[in-house]
Amino acid sequence: MTYRIVVGTDFSDASSHALLHALHVLGAAPSGELHLTHVVIDADATRAGNLERDEALMESAFQRLKATLVDENFRSAHAHDETFDRQVVYHVRLAKSVAAALEQVAFDVDAHLVVVGTHGRTGLEKWMLGSVADELLKNNRVPLLVARPTHYEGMTKSQHMEPGKPGVNIHAQRHDFVYSSERVSFGGRSSRVSGLL
């Protein structure tokens, strides 16, 4: 089975982070396709005055999409990972909504996952500009991975690997928690021959 991932990009650092996460996920699949997607926003693409501008924006976006994976900065960020060797499909869509366009691409290609970055907007800025990730979550049409840089500042490690059971003081010097680790394998077929016909 070919595992297909749609990655939405606006060419920002947040989008690059989303793309790196998508490559990690896709790297674990035996066969996969990356659908790198940019959406050109136009609330009224049918107006004659907008058509020429939109065509220029779409062509520019297409060239930037194709340059994304060969960009030196991006390649150096991905350099510590395994070699990437997957089919990449480039999509540029003209739409009123980025989220709706990403959902449509996912539907069109039978995607298994959509990956987007987040700019970390909060408060008034988020209310005014909205959030593609929020809209995708609200619509709940596609499996979604929202990628953002790790931000652990101000946190401290737990004293125990696992928190205590509900109602138990996790700071007490007791081992009243459950922790277990094991390797689990599933899927695939056994190569063992059990008999002959």
Image (cartoon, rainbow, N blue to C red):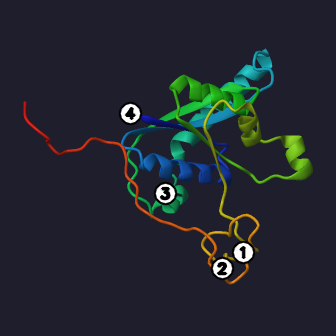
Q: Nearer the viewer, mark 2 or mark 1?
A: 1
Of mark 3 and mark 1, the one earlier in the sequence is 3
Residue 143 appears anywhere in the view: yes
Within the image, what quadrant is residue 196 found in? top left
- The dot on residue 170 is 1
SS class, disc 1:
loop
- Residue 17 percent coordinates (x, y): 61, 54
Task: Give the residue type that dot 3 points to.
Answer: Arg
Q: Nearer the viewer, residue 190 or 197?
A: 197
Residue in view at x 54 percent, y 59 percent: 73
Q: Is residue 94 above or below residue 150?
A: above
* Residue highlighted by disc 3: 75
Q: Nearer the viewer, residue 113 or 74?
A: 113
Assess whether mark 3 and mark 4 are in contact (beta carbons under 8 angstroms).
no
SS class, disc 4:
loop
In which quadrant will I find the C terminus? top left
* Residue highlighted by disc 2: 159
Task: Give the residue type that dot 4 points to.
Answer: Met
Q: Nearer the viewer, mark 3 or mark 1?
A: 1
SS class, disc 3:
helix
Task: Give the residue type that dot 2 points to.
Answer: Gln
Task: Give the residue type that dot 1 points to.
Answer: Ile
- Residue 37 percent coordinates (x, y): 59, 36
- The dot on residue 1 is 4
